[in-house]
Image: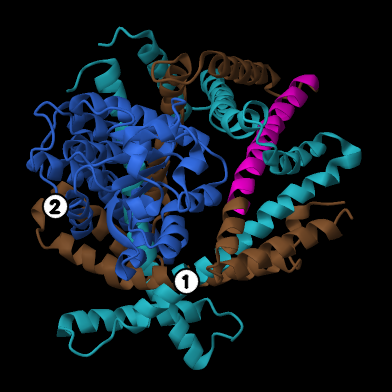
Amino acid sequence: MSYNPWVWFAAFLTLCTFSFLWRDNPFYKFAEHLFVGVSVGYTISILYHNSFMPRVWEPIVTNHQYYVLLPTLLGLLAFAIFFKKISWLIRYPIAFIMGSTCGISIPRSFEGYIFKHTQSTITAISPGLPPFLLISNIIMVIGVITTLLYFYFSLEHKGVMGKVANVGIWYIMLAFGASFGYTVMARVSLLIGRLQFLLHDWLGVIK
Amino acid sequence: MNIWEKMMDIDRRWIYLLVGICVLIPLIRPVGLPTFTTPYTQALFDYIDKIPPDGSAILISFDFDPATAPELLPMAQAILRHCFFKDINVLCLGLYPTYIGMIDMALSNVKDDYEAKSGEDFVFLPYVPGVTAVMLSIGEDIKRTFGRDYYGVPLDSLPMMRHIRNYDDIALVLSISGTQLPREWAVLVGTTYHVRVGVGTTAVSAAEFYTFLQTGQFVGMLGGLKGAAEYENLIHAKGYTKKDTRKVASMGMDAQSFVHMLMIVLIVIGNIAYFNIRKKKAR
Amino acid sequence: MKRQIPLIIAFICGIGMIIQFFIPHPVSQKTYEEVLHWQIIVGIFMMIIAVRSLCVVHIDKIRRKKEGWGYSFITLFAIAFTAFVGIAFGMGEESLISDLYQYIMVPMQSTMFSLLAFYMASAAYRAFKARTAQATLLLVVALVVMFGRVPVGERLVPWLPRVIEWILMYPNMAAQRGILLGVGLGMIATSLKIILGIERGYLGGG
């Protein structure tokens, strides 16, 4: 069993949270509000030590790198949101971030999401592949095309289009089934982790 | 009410109790069943194993917070053990404030076993806001992007950083994440700087990332607690860990087995009940 | 001025960064680096706004004595205490804030998410029914993956892991790729709409 008061406090908070399974109660509410506060306080500390001081304060005040004032002033415009009359000024830094992020991501998204995956789909079927691999790749290509067509709602899903979209649904259901199986594993892992903490770190019952 | 209707009406807290018991029993009395290593775990392991010591670094992006730590922290620790044993330099990065604590925890749990030192064997990079900007900025100049390490030491003064400038000096970017960030690493960074990307992810996201494995955008993948357990077994089999090192993920796989069996039984019973009730209503 | 100039800024930055991608000249590279650097600094101030918003919500709750307002004191005290501890005493390996992270944030966040395991078991028992042929396929694949991905399943049916790998690598991957291509095209379309000023939601009202 642990003698570290922090471990006991962590175990107490863990049990407070698990108490929600029975029903909502003051212990759970206390733990939840404490967590929110500590998270935000932690974020403030990280921002101060790792971001604001080394990237804004020290370059301007200590190292006299005054060109840093330009992005700093743009960032400071965000604080205009505190004042109703000039709150529209926050749109300037937001527009800069949105515009530049979109511009950076478009060509890279084309290459990384569209071209690479389309290329891999088209080149999957090539002569000379072993029969099993060839059939598997054909199944894969049919799946990609039918799934894409299922999500194409500009054409009504009737007749041939309807049949093709229906095949797409089967592939999607299969994928969702696989995802569900994995999701079960993920959620259970989280529970295992917490119980390992209680049994090992707190009570010392397991190795 | 017949038995099937009664079963469907059962208080959900009985199910919670069953789940709790199915996790507790195998943790207290482990069975120790071995786990099958998937090809993508092996691929990632082999890739890291081939990186020469004290040469190009691995950038591990700890893209997860405490919510997914039970799955991803064991994975991160296993990879750190692998790197420290093989003297592979490691850069540790967190793209959001709450991810930084995970790096702290992982390093604290692992570095003393290998006498790994900050600045020589690993560098803990500080948090800098602007996810995409940081990912791309590393490709230009790491030192300019971060300035100092997490402890406040200038990167210029660290021995490990002498020969690491940008992605040209990084053999692998490994994103350990419960989010879509690995995709962003592959699309933004892999595409622009042609650096290889690997992924450790929660089981929830693992099924989605197969498409990136097929294109070669990911060199390998660890999926969920099972992936972590597989990697622990691989490094243990190669003798990269101490004898008394706790294999946290492997210990959890027995509980995983029990709960999965319980879930399968519950789903089957639920469906049998459904069909019986439906037949009764049809009459 | 209130809406036109931000739209112009977004347009110039967006088009500029697209064109920059195709120009390998050093001036283009330098511009790219500076834009990234500016984004990082502006991002610092945006994060501060987010923190402030949360504090305002709780202060308002206390002032208006809304339901559960007493708990807001806990939140505000925790924010102030943690921020003070972090700023005043630093963030090294054995710092107080490191303990607050490890023994409050980690257990709380992990435990909240671990509750999902219970809810999922209950939901699967009550709602996961083979009502149609397609739902049956979903159910069967889910059961196969759940069984085959754990040591018990791997031991009882040794060839099952390979079948699951095939399912994941081919039909599952096909559907995921179809969805990914759709999502990718959607993202590109939305980004273009933002740059061209068609999508203006990020500007807010007024």
Which residue bears the numbered disc 2?
B36
Q: Which residues are magenta?
A: C35-63
Which residue bears the numbered disc 1?
A111
Residue for point 17% across, 36% down: B85
Q: Residue furthest right?
A: A85
Task: Quadrant for residue A62, please give it.
Answer: top right
Shown in blue, the chain is B
Task: Point out the frontmost of discs 1 and 2.
Answer: 1
Which element type, helix, strand or loop, lies under badge 1? helix
Q: Looking at the image, is B276 positioned above or below residue B158?
A: below
Indicate whether residue C39 is drawn in magenta. yes
Disc 2 packing (10 Å; few <14; some 14–19; many ≥20): some
Q: Position of residue C202 (x, y in %)?
A: 73, 54
Q: Residue furthest bottom?
A: A160
Q: Position of residue B224 (x, y in %)?
A: 30, 47
Q: Position of residue B105 (x, y in %)?
A: 35, 27
